[in-house]
Amino acid sequence: MTVSRPDGLGDIANLGMTLAEAKLLLAQVQQQVVAAQVDTHAAFRPDCRSCGRRCHVKDWQPHRIATLFGEVRLKLPRFLCAGCGCGETGVGWPSHCRSTPELNQLQARLSALMPYRVAVDLQQHLLPVDAGKSPETLRSHTLLVGKQLGHAAAEKSPAATAITMSLDATFIRSCEEGERQLEVRVGNVETGDGGRQVFGAVSRTETDITTLIQRTLETVGRTDTTKVTAFTDGCPGLRTVLTNTGVTKPPILDWFHIAMRLQHTKLAAANLSTDSPDRLMAKAVIVAEVERLHWRIWNGKAKNAQRSINRIRKVMHVFKGESSQRAKGVASRKLWHALHAVDKYLRGQAAWLVNYAKRFRAGLRVGTSITEGTANFLVNRRMNKSQQMRWSRNGADLLLQVRCAVYNGTLGAGVGHRFDRISDADSALAKAA
Ligand SMILES: [Zn+2]
């Protein structure tokens, strides 16, 4: 191959090789490397596994293998023992193998982060990959990697004195007959020194959530003396899962879940119209009362939260007939719904609320450090964004295993997108409080 670029650097676009040239070059180098490997392999004669005598070549079998740098075609010898007639392949991989593990892993990594179709495009754009051009191929490679991850042994960390764990549930749309939704359980565990692992499983699949959590806890160094604090919302199913994994202390309601609802309330209050003196006054009362509501819950006085909610409801009548603000909708109606959501949530979760301010001052966590919530981070970003995405139970579960492995840095050999050390996410929350 000859690389011939225009000499004139008057145009910056002429500088260096183009992507097309680089892809072609890589593909050709790959062919040469493989050809040399095949030559070496051709001279190799294994010993028989049963009688130990030297094998001879029986025939040559053609292979077509997709690699990161293009498809390679090769003929490999099959061997036969002269003594006992046993067959040998001389390679450690199965004869139906069609792609290299590194290609599979790259495809799995891309698929974990973006839709299969987009992943195909990106891969085709950057690499001289000429196999795996369809989203279906990418999907099957990804699910295969997901399956292998389930069997991989956990790597253990030194003992941790304290671990915080969050457990959450979300739903994705099902493509299977007779089912609308699939339940997904997700969470993350964190140690005091900044270690973190995320985990997730679609319910009723081969991935058992209890086993998965136990394995994750072991990975970050749980021992008999480790103090485990769990954050969840009060859903009985999740509490049972926690008990099964050996977390006996009652879980705490994750501050994130409350903060999210309070945020909706604040936004709606801020958008209330002020087109009359009555409304101007009422809005001032409401904005102040929403702040107080926030302060009360943060300081463990959720019982008094009801007072704030009642006070707001009492003055809301002046917004009757409030007009819609285009895309924003009717602020007072939104506020009404948001308040209702906060109220209902507090009533249902009362047993799991704590004094968050006190915990925070004592240097204890008030929730997960993934500030957008683990469910959104792990599941919704990739699997729930578009309403058109529908999932099979096993397909969703295996993709989720890959997604977790990408964030945990356990996919492939040391090329993980490991988490940054946990930043002081709690102070961001405290500022918001
Ligand atoms: Zn033999």
Image (cartoon, rainbow, N blue to C red):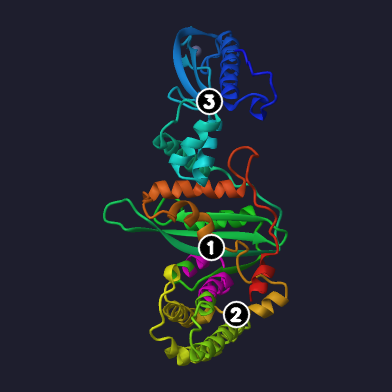
The answer to whether residue 85 is seen in the rendering is: no
Q: Badge 3, how many Cα within 10 Å: few under 14, some, many 20+?
A: many
Secondary structure mostly seen in the magenta stretch: helix
**Gap in angstroms between the C-alphas marked 3 and 1:** 46 Å
**366 left or right of 279 in image:** right
Residue 217 coordinates in the image, percent (x, y): 60, 57
Residue to which mark 3 is pinned: 128
* Element type at mark 2: loop
Q: Are marks 3 and 1 in contact (CB under 8 Å)?
A: no
Q: Badge 2, how many Cα within 10 Å: few under 14, some, many 20+?
A: many
- Report if residue 29 lies within the magenta region: no
Q: Which sits in the foreground, 89 or 106?
A: 106
**What amino acid is at disc 2?**
Val
* Element type at mark 3: loop
* Element type at mark 1: loop
Residue to which mark 2 is pinned: 354
Q: Looking at the picture, does residue 381 appear above or below residue 21?
A: below
Residue to which mark 1 is pinned: 245
- Report if residue 246 lies within the magenta region: yes
**Gap in angstroms between the C-alphas marked 1 and 2:** 23 Å
Q: Which sits in the foreground, 286 or 129?
A: 286
**154 left or right of 151 in image:** right
**What amino acid is at disc 3?**
Pro
